[in-house]
């Protein structure tokens, strides 16, 4: 299971450059609009990280606790 996180970002000074929605603020993607999205596939601390064109980075921590994984074990009636 996974969820999609979206955020609206802005920078009035130099402009936005890239973002990462991850556990480590790595693997930045170029920003093409003021709405960013990322897929989260496990509970825990995640970060929305945004860099501007001047190289400044802003990081917001979010704590995800709603992803459930349900495992069903099927037993063959002939085994």
Image: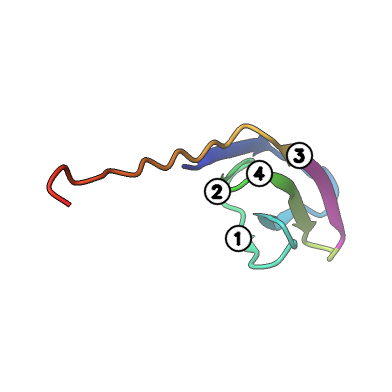
Vertical placement of residue 50 versus 33, above or below:
below
Q: Which residue is mark 1?
A: 30
Residue at the image position 65 percent from the left and 64 percent from the top = 28
- Considering only order in the chain, which callout, 1 or 4, is on the residue closer to the N terminus? 1
Question: Is tag 1's residue or tag 3's residue first in the polypeptide sequence?
Answer: 1
Q: Which mark is residue 63?
A: 3
> In the rendered structure, which segment of residues is drawn in magenta?
56-62
Q: Residue visible at 81% across and 44% down?
A: 61
Q: For the residues marked 2 and 3, what is the alpha-carbon distance in whole angstroms? A: 13 Å
Rate crowding at label 4 as few (under 14), some (14 to 19) or many (20 or more) other CA atoms within 10 Å: few
Measure the alpha-carbon separation of dots 1 and 2: 21 Å
Viewer-nearest residue: 31 or 26: 26
Residue at which label 2 appears: 41
Tell which tag, 4 or 1, sits nearer the viewer: 4
Marks 1 and 3, how far apart at CA: 24 Å
Element type at marker 4? loop
Where does residue 79 sit, x and y in percent of width and height?
17, 52
Q: What crowding class fits label 1: few (fewer than 14 Cα within 10 Å), some (14-19), or many (20 or more)?
A: few
Viewer-nearest of discs 1 and 3: 3
Farthest-out residue, left = 78
Q: Main secondary structure of the magenta part?
A: strand
Determine whether the residue tagged by mark 1 lies in a helix, strand or loop.
strand
């Amino acid at each position: 299971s996974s969820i999609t996180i979206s955020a609206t970002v802005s920078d009035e000074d130099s402009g936005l450059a890239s973002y990462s929605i991850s556990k480590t603020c790595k693997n930045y993607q170029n920003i093409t609009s003021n709405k960013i999205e990322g897929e989260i596939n496990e509970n825990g601390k995640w970060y929305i990280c945004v860099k501007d064109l001047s190289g400044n980075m802003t990081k917001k921590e979010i704590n995800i606790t709603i992803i459930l994984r349900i495992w069903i074990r099927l037993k063959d009636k002939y085994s």
